[in-house]
């Protein structure tokens, strides 16, 4: 059974690129450019991993990450944060994320990070 990834990214070009890239690797991908409730979206899509843009329209992706990690039903999910502004995370913290990707992405780094986070979750499950 293929692993499922939920991506929340408000840049449609990046969202499409990530969706295509991960689907080509055999993952099932739910790609959202907005979510009213990250917990509701997780319950709806049942992902094995969540990818969040740090700067989303109207909300800080770090706050969504914190919400995932602070909710008992979702705290086990690996979360990858992404941003073109890595110094922001240096100053604000990683919000409990399991990994961080710097934009623009290196495709091999994206794939390795996703694979490592999913495998690490399976080891600790």
Image (cartoon, rainbow, N blue to C red):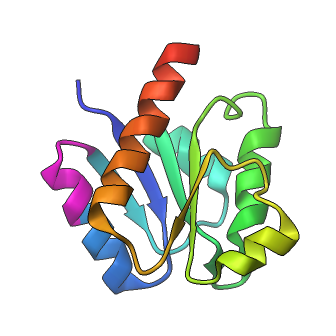
Q: Quadrant of residue 106?
A: bottom left
Q: Is residue 125 visible?
A: no
Q: In this orientation, does residue 18 appear?
A: yes
Relative side of 89 to 85, left or right: right
Query: Does residue 80 lie above or below 118 as drawn?
Result: below
What is the count of numbered marks? 0
Q: Is residue 118 above or below residue 97?
A: above
Q: Quadrant of the N terminus?
A: top left
Q: Nearer the viewer, residue 10 or 116?
A: 116
Q: Residue at x 32, y 84 (%)?
A: 13
Residue 34: x, y in percent?
A: 54, 73
Position of residue 108 measured from the top left corner of the image (x, y, whole percent) = 28, 58
Residue beneath the point at 73% across and 79% down: 87
Q: Name the spot of residue 62 as percent of width and height, x first.
A: 74, 64
Name, please, the residue furthest toward the left.
24
Above or below, comparing residue 62 to residue 95 in the picture: below
In the rendering, at what x and y percent does residue 72 appear? 78, 28
Magenta region: which residues? 20-27
In the image, what residue occupies the spot 22% across and 61% down? 21
Q: Quadrant of the C terminus?
A: top right
Q: What residue is rendered at 56% in x and 39% in y?
A: 43
Q: Main secondary structure of the magenta part?
A: helix
Magenta stretch encompasses residue 39 = no
């Amino acid at each position: 059974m293929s692993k499922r990834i939920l991506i929340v990214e408000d840049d449609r070009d990046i969202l499409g690129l990530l969706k295509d890239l991960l689907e080509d690797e055999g993952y099932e991908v739910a790609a959202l450019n907005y979510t009213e409730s990250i917990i509701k979206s997780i319950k709806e899509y049942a992902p094995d991993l969540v990818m969040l843009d740090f700067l989303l329209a109207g909300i800080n992706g770090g706050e969504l990450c914190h919400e995932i990690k602070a909710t008992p039903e979702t705290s086990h999910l690996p979360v990858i944060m992404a941003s073109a502004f890595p110094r922001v995370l240096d100053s604000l913290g990683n919000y409990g994320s399991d990994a961080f990707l710097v934009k623009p992405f290196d495709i091999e780094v994206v794939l390795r990070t996703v694979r490592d986070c999913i495998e690490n979750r399976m080891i600790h499950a």
